[in-house]
Image: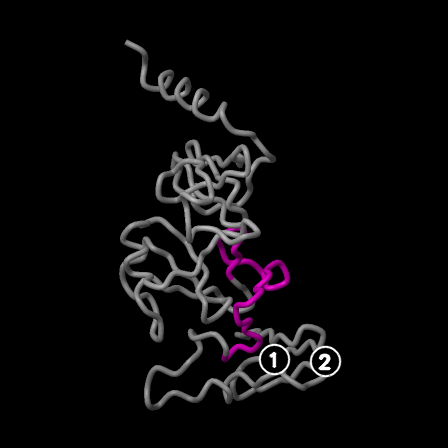
Amino acid sequence: MMANGLFWSTFTAMFLSAYSLTASAQNYRMCDGNRTGTFADPSDCRFFIFCLNGQPKRYQCHNQKIYSTKTKTCVSASEAIGECTSVFKRTTEVSNPEEYCRNNPNAFLPHPDSCALFYNCSQTKRVQLFLDTYVNECPYMQLFSEKTLSCQHYSRVRCDQRKEPKDVCDYRRFWCGSAHCVPCFIRYPSCNGKPNVAVIFPSLILIVHCWIEDISTEVIKEN
């Protein structure tokens, strides 16, 4: 009887031989945790990611077919209506995230309300005030990348139609959750319309640095 490891290697080689191997995939969250399986490429419907023990490889479907997340195979566009746009950009916005996450428990998706928000379908409990189940938020100065399905520095992410947060108070983690909370706009002044400057607030024990080039606020806590 063929050993499990050898059987799997032989099966994998036969399966993937029908597709074109492209450059090795990098930073794809769907392979985290030493996972093995095939997953949609979030940036292009014609490609998919094959994970083997956590290591990703990117493959392309033949004959302009697209990778279907439902059948886990390459199919014609008519067989995957609603999964892809006319320019092969994968449709990631979902109308019913709870139902989608039940059917795709390991999926990561951008959130339509903010470029800093995203859906983590493996997260079945609320992790933060002002966020629904499955919804998470990137740390300040990071945004959710549709390409890598992870939080990246804002300079490396294209938000396209998603609203891009600029100030500290655009991130929900800084919103007030109690009646006695000092409002965020007082704790973290906005940089919008301000020149390059470093403003010191001794009573708040913080320094706010403003860069007019990208209208971002960097908050540095001091001990």
The mark found on residue 196 in the picture is 2
Q: Is residue 93 left or right of residue 3?
A: right
Residue type, label 2: Asn
Residue density around tag 2, few if under 14, some if 14–19, many if 20 or more, within 10 Å = few
- Residue 91 x %, y %: 46, 55
Query: What x and y, as percent, mark residue 136?
Result: 39, 64
Q: Residue furthest front?
A: 78
The x, y position of residue 184, in whole percent, is 47, 85
Residue that label 1 marks: 208
Sequence-wise, the earlier of marks 2 and 1 is: 2
Tell which tag, 2 or 1, sits nearer the viewer: 2
Dividing the picture into quadrants, the one containing residue 30 is top left
> Which of these two is toward me, 17 or 123?
17
Q: Which residues are magenta?
A: 144-169
> Relative to the observer, which residue lies in front, 50 or 125?
50
Q: Are marks 2 and 1 in contact (CB under 8 Å)?
A: no
